[in-house]
Amino acid sequence: MLGSLVLAAAFQVLPFYEQRPADDYWAVRPLWSTERGDVDVAWPVFTWHGDWWSFCRVVNWQDYHDGADGYQFTVLPLWFNGRDKESGAYGGLFPLAGGHPHVGMMYDFKFALWPLWHQYKMPRGRTWMETNAVLFPFVSWRDDGAWSFWPFYGINYQRESDHQYALWPLVTWADYRADRDTAGEGYSWMVWPLYGRIRRAREEQDLYLPPFFSWTTTYSKSWAEKGNSAPEMRLRCPWPFFEWESNARRSRISVWPLYERVDWRTYDKGDEAGSVTRFGWKLVELYEDETRVFPFWASGRRHFRLWPLWESETDKAGQVTRGRFLAPLPVRWMPQIDRNWAKFWTFYENESTPLYTDHSLLWGLIRWRTLKP
């Protein structure tokens, strides 16, 4: 017992200090912690992860290591500057003026007095498509001929379809060319909120008072090859309160927010791939290998939670299980919270292996080991 107490004093002092050399872990809570090169200072005030750091999630720095001393510095939402291998130096003061090589799905994004003007590119096959907008979202045009004077009229050319609207969203229509991946050649139109229709080579859909009532049939070659003579189907009546569907990926019935049942299938063979039954939307979820009652209970192959009293987690090999009391957060462990704050409410924890269980009470002041038979 004396040896255990000396060891505890050397490596842990109540919840304030802890050191685990085997994990390259050191913490002076809540001011400082480091684990395998990750450093937190009064988290979430400052975090450093080797090639990036963040101050209050507002000031951020990122090293790209792309062979051109690439980096990016941002002060959200006003300032950004950086350098990358393709574009060189860039920067901007939002919303006055600037340019960025990649924002979301947009490339070579430029703006001036936003939303007065902006411009960006997006990949289209092996080429690039450029979009300009003035007084966004009212006026925009692209170099492929698409343009929009929102909400009065607009036309949008996609890879295998042409979409138009008039007095959006009241009247919309589209023409589809033959393709390989979606529903094939055909057309669609909708006069919202009264009626909409889709007629394509592999899909038929009627919408009444969209989006509340609809009936969809889809003709999938892979679905038929599995011996299913009926098409894939979906009924919404009315959405979102009742929905039923049966297709190559899943069978589903939903009476929202009371009940839902989903049975998944493997896409290549159509074999059973799991199921879930839900009650009260997602308050109660019954999987084949896990039960969740949010936020009070979660029990699966590798974790267990009885909120707010207890939680445990097993490693991927299934050899080591770690548990703790208390567990006041309604979500599973997060590394930053675990390093910097969790010890303040963790009065007891254990680590169990196939041979023994190590126990720690009152932040390591009392430790003991029990052997398994």
Image: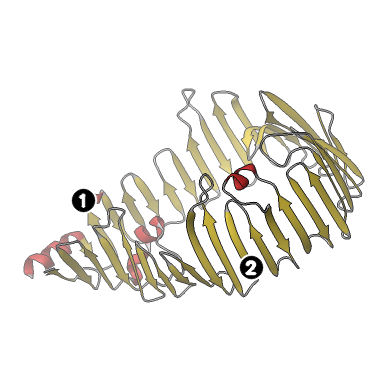
SS for dot 1: helix
Quarter occupied by residue 161: top right
Residue 69, numbered circle: none
Residue 330 drawn at (x, y percent): 46, 69
Closest to the observer, 316 or 70: 316
The residue indicated by pointer 2 is: 254
Q: Is residue 167 above or below residue 92?
A: below
User: Visible in this render: residue 231?
Assistant: yes
Would you say 190 lies left or right of 241 here? right
SS for dot 2: strand
The residue indicated by pointer 1 is: 21
Residue 295 drawn at (x, y percent): 48, 73
Which residue shows up at 76% across the image and 59% down it? 215
Q: Tell me if label 1 and label 2 are in contact, CB under 8 Å.
A: no
What's the colour scheme? secondary structure
Q: Quadrant of the C terminus?
A: bottom left
Residue 168 drawn at (x, y percent): 87, 50
Would you say 273 lies left or right of 370 here? right
Closest to the observer, 144 or 209: 209
Would you say 202 lies left or right of 322 here? right
- How many residues crowd around disc 2 within 10 Å: few (fewer than 14), some, or many (20 or more)? many
Which residue shows up at 22% across the image and 54% down it? 20
* Identity, as a three-letter code, of the amino acid under mark 1: Pro
Q: Quadrant of the N terminus?
A: bottom left
Closest to the observer, 234 or 167: 234
Number of disc labels: 2
Which residue shows up at 64% across the image and 42% down it? 221
Outermost residue on the left side: it is 2
Residue 214 drawn at (x, y percent): 77, 60
Q: Is residue 74 above or below residue 296?
A: above
Q: CA distance from mark 1 to mark 2?
A: 51 Å
